[in-house]
Image (cartoon, rainbow, N blue to C red):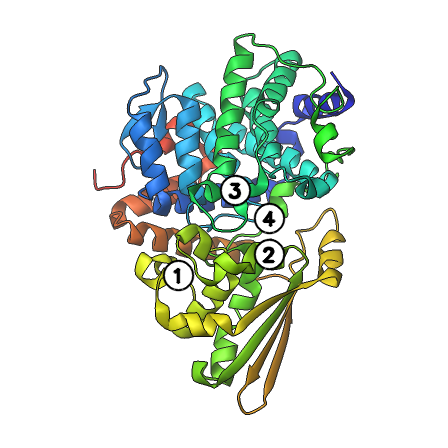
Amino acid sequence: MDKTSQKLVGFATEFSLDNLSQSARAAATDLVVDTIACAIVGSRSEPASIVARVAKGIQSTPGATVFGAGIKTSPEIAALANAIMTRTYDYNDAYYGHPSDMIPGILAAGEISRSSGLNVLAAIALAYEVYGAFSRSAAYHLDSGVDYGFSMNVGVALAVGKLWNLPAAQLANAASLALIPNLPLGVGRWGALSMMKGSITAFATRNGVFSAMLAKEGFTSAEQPYEGIFGLQHFIGKFDLHLPLDKEKRVVEMVYIKPIPAENNTIGVIELVPKIRAWASVEDIESIDIDVATGLDVHLADEPKYDPKTRETADHSFPYMLARALVDGGITLDSYTPERISDPSIRPLMRKIRVHANPDMKEIMSKSPINQPEFKPARLVVRRKDGGVLTEDVMGHSGHPDTPTHVRRAQINTKLDLCAKRMNVPAEQCERIRDNWWKIAEAEDISRLIGLLSTFRAS
């Protein structure tokens, strides 16, 4: 094994429930319930439905559940389908991306091995540690054009392998197998966006599960996937993983929970909409200027974002989301219907919204403390036609991980209610899901809880 593989495998081998404080277990539970809520509302989305149709023809013993579809399939395909559901509305967690995209893979692996809830929570926490280490130690990979999903390949493979009690050599092969044939390209998240925007990391989750399955059966892979000839560091540059990021605090405790379905860097500004609307009517607005970290200006406001054709483009369009919120009073799941996305009446307002690159904000983001969530700086300047100016600075949003646990869980319960209602999930089923998944740590067999997600209708 090369140095990076040794560090990863050594960390995974030693990681256990003893590494999780009560606070970390609570945070991991929060993330699981939040993921379930997001998967429910995404279960009938077009990309998730496509994968579910494919899954019907793939039989496996034991099988893993495709949420809401009433079918079981091979665990890696269930992981793909359920991760796509989770990611569909850009509503799930945020920490240098969306690490909860990995959770469906770990749930599928836990289901077929009938793992306990506590062991699943530990595996999720391990995956987040690996993902966080890559996010902070190899953050400059973005300039290489490699998508951040590459680290989820590795995180899921190690977490699933750990859940299945694979020995160190098989863990190393699982992590290498997950990475080498599965290096995702960043192009899927730039410009006009397709179904792939919300699916890149779902494929990474699928790859991690499948690689652990192969490694468990004895499949081997390159011993030096990082520092070897044409290994990962050849493409993204050298790095030294900081693992763990913090001796006391787990990565699951550093993650934002989204209060609205919108790209994470936009939420702090969108939450200012009530204040803007109280200060000026839409008709009185002359212009809106937003400063963001360099790079985000292109990501959130290049030309395709001023005329979004898809939901994926709309939920990453700062002009669309802010204009929609100013007109409607906020952003909800209904903000992304085809009719609202194509609404010609808000195009003039969108053109008044200009997003600018600010290198100082890029520097602020890069200096986020290693044991804290990522800073999300933005400056909003609204000008009225009468010459009035409103200026606001933000550094994050209301889903910050330092939110008190009881407030955070109330927010997640509200999200679960909203998502379940949108999918016409019966109230009694929603309550069964809520009651059981909040008690995941008490579950002796995670498959029983997953059974509650097989179909979303009254039993």
Tell me the residue at 37%/33% (across/down): 449
Q: Earlier in the sequence, mark 3 or mark 1?
A: 3
Residue 402 against residue 240 in the figure, above or below: below
Percent from the top left, x then y, of residue 25?
Answer: 57, 40
Percent from the top left, x then y, of residue 191?
Answer: 52, 51
Can residue 20 be seen here? The reply is no
At label 3, counting other C-alpha atoms closer than 10 Å, the crowd grade (few under 14, some 14-19, many 20 or more) is some
Position of 3 with respect to 321 (left or right) is right
Instruction: Identify the mark at residue 255; answer none if there is no mark.
Output: 4
Which element type, helix, strand or loop, lies under badge 4? loop
Image quadrant holding the N terminus, namely top right
| Separation of residues labelled 2 and 4 (CA atoms) | 24 Å
Tell me the residue at 56%/49% (across/down): 94
Q: Tell me the kind of residue under disc 1.
A: Thr
Image quadrant holding the C terminus, namely top left
Q: Earlier in the sequence, mark 4 or mark 3?
A: 3
| Separation of residues labelled 1 and 4 (CA atoms) | 21 Å
Using the image as rendered, state which of residue 262 and residue 431 is in the foreground: 262
Residue 359 against residue 449 in the figure, above or below: below
Percent from the top left, x then y, of residue 410?
Answer: 46, 56
Mark 1 and mark 4 residues within 8 Å of each other at the beta carbon: no
Residue 273 against residue 137 in the figure, above or below: below
Which element type, helix, strand or loop, lies under badge 3? helix
